[in-house]
Structure formats: C-alpha cells, structure tokens
Image: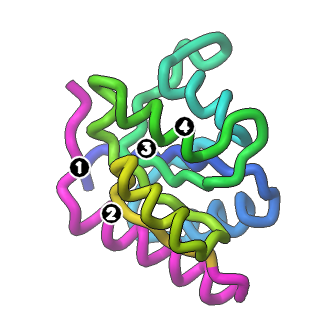
Amino acid sequence: MGMPVEILLVEDNEGDIRLTTEAFKEGKISNRLYVVRDGVEALEFLNRKGSYAQAIRPDIILLDLNLPRKDGREVLTDIKNHAQLKRIPVVILTTSKAEQDILRAYDLHANCYITKPVDLEEFLTVVRTIEEFWLTIVKLPGDE
C-alpha cells in the first residue's frame, strides 16, 4: 500500500455527501476524503487560501455541477485554466443528464462525467466503481 489517495468532494447535498463518505469508507483503498460544500470553498481549498492554507493537493476531484455561490462549471473552468491544478483529474458527479451539460463539461476538460443514480445501491456502486477505476487502475499525476 502506498500513500493514501487524497480525494476532494465538492458537493452541497448532505445525503450525497453521506453516501459518498460511506462508500469510500467501505472501499479497499486507503483514502482520505475532504468535503467542501460550494464552489467558492472548493477554489479556496485548491488554492490553499484562508482557512485552507494547510490543505493538501488532492489526487482527484469529484465535482457536482449545481453548487451554491459558484457553480461546478465555473470551478471546472478555473481548475483547468490553472497551471498546476489542471493536471488533477476531475470527475463530474451530478444529477444532470442534460446533453449540453455533458458536452460543456468535456469542452471544459472534465476527465469524466457521471450522472448520479437516484437508487441508493446504484449510487454506492457508482462510487465504488470510481474508486476502483480512478484509484487503482489509473495512474494519477504526482504532486510536483
């Protein structure tokens, strides 16, 4: 086992936060999940601003699109326009099935787009699959 994988979850829905946390807890990979609840906080965390001055650089970001204060599309744009942050894989995890959201996310260089299932078991399966694929199979860029 190497270093734990650092995951940043950007999500404002308490139920989804709880489910994602549970799914990662049961996971086989040692990971640390950090949660921020809106787009402004997400960027403060990633840029180590304010109360997040000591924040780690996550290995992967799970990003909801519909967030308060600054939506996920803006957050994604800021991440992918940033010299260092742009290398961090961003997984869009959202309720939106809208074609224009999917296309726009990929246009903004999201690494993948996943629609949140409404069903509890399916949601847990999706999170476990994200964990399995992104945390075990994919080679993540190291922090420079």
Binning the other alpha carbons within 10 Å of mark 3 as few (below 14), some (14 to 19) or many (20 upward) gives: some
- Rendered residue at 67%/28% (across/down): 40
Image colouring: rainbow
Compare residues 111 and 10 and report the one nearer the observer.
Answer: 111
- Kindly identify which residue carries mark 2: 134
Tell whether label 2 touches label 4 (CB within 8 Å): no
Q: Earlier in the sequence, mark 4 or mark 1?
A: 4
Closer to the eye: label 4 or 2: 4
Compare residues 89 and 2 and report the one nearer the observer.
Answer: 89
The correct choice, above or below, for 140 with respect to 113 in the image is: above
Tell whether label 4 touches label 3 (CB within 8 Å): no
Locate residue 77, reporting x and y percent: 45, 37
128 in magenta: yes
Which image quarter: residue 17?
A: bottom right
Tell whether label 1 touches label 4 (CB within 8 Å): no
- Which residue range is magenta in the image? 117-144
Binning the other alpha carbons within 10 Å of mark 4 as few (below 14), some (14 to 19) or many (20 upward) gives: many
Give, as a three-letter code, the residue at label 3: Glu
- Kindly identify which residue carries mark 4: 75
